[in-house]
Image: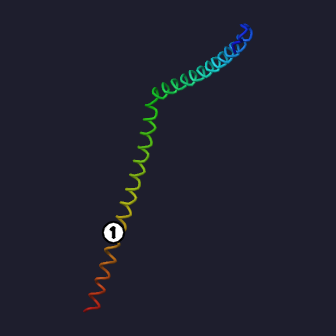
Amino acid sequence: MWDPDGSRESFEAPVLDWIRCIETDLSHLQSQLEDVNNKLNDLRHDIIEVSVQPMIYYADFQQIKDQLDLRQVRLSRLLTILAAIYLPFSFVSVSSKLFRLKAEIS
């Protein structure tokens, strides 16, 4: 603080402390800004890397879709074969029941 006697040393001590605090804060701010800059550069690199490789992701998606289509074809083929075997036997069992009913009625 200011000394009424006009002593310069009593005035300079708080100002020097204040300057040291400001220098410390500015150096901390500079290190934080450097960290943010590094993180932004890493993020920029990751974005560029992802934007360069979209065809790889599309190829993976296309391969998965093709495999699912093949499985669906196999499933529908299996259901067709089962239907081809089951349907005639179901008509045979129905027709034999009808014949038995006719025989019992007559």
From the viewer's perspective, tell me whether residue 12 is left or right of residue 40. right
From the viewer's perspective, tell me whether residue 106 is left or right of residue 52. left
Front-lying residue, 3 or 86: 3
Residue 24 drawn above or below residue 76: above
Q: Residue at x 31, y 74 (%)?
A: 91
From the viewer's perspective, tell me whether residue 19 is left or right of residue 78. right
Residue 29 image offset from top left, x and y in percent: 61, 20
SS of the residue at dot 1? helix
Residue 42 image offset from top left, x and y in percent: 55, 24
Front-lying residue, 63 or 99: 63
Residue 89 drawn above or below residue 11: below
- Residue at which label 1 appears: 87
Q: Residue at x 35, y 64 (%)?
A: 83
Quarter that holds the C terminus: bottom left
Residue 103 image offset from top left, x and y in percent: 28, 89
Q: Residue at x 43, y 31 (%)?
A: 55
From the viewer's perspective, tell me whether residue 64 is left or right of residue 22. left
Local packing at callout 1 (Cα closer than 10 Å; few below 14, some 14-19, many 20+) is few
Q: Residue at x 60, y 19 (%)?
A: 34
Residue 3 picture quarter: top right
Residue sitting farthest toward the front: 4
Residue 102 drawn above or below residue 53: below
Front-lying residue, 46 or 35: 35
Quarter that holds the N terminus: top right
Check disc 1 and give the amino acid type: Leu
Residue 88 image offset from top left, x and y in percent: 32, 70
Number of numbered labels in the structure image? 1
Residue 17 picture quarter: top right
Front-lying residue, 15 or 49: 15
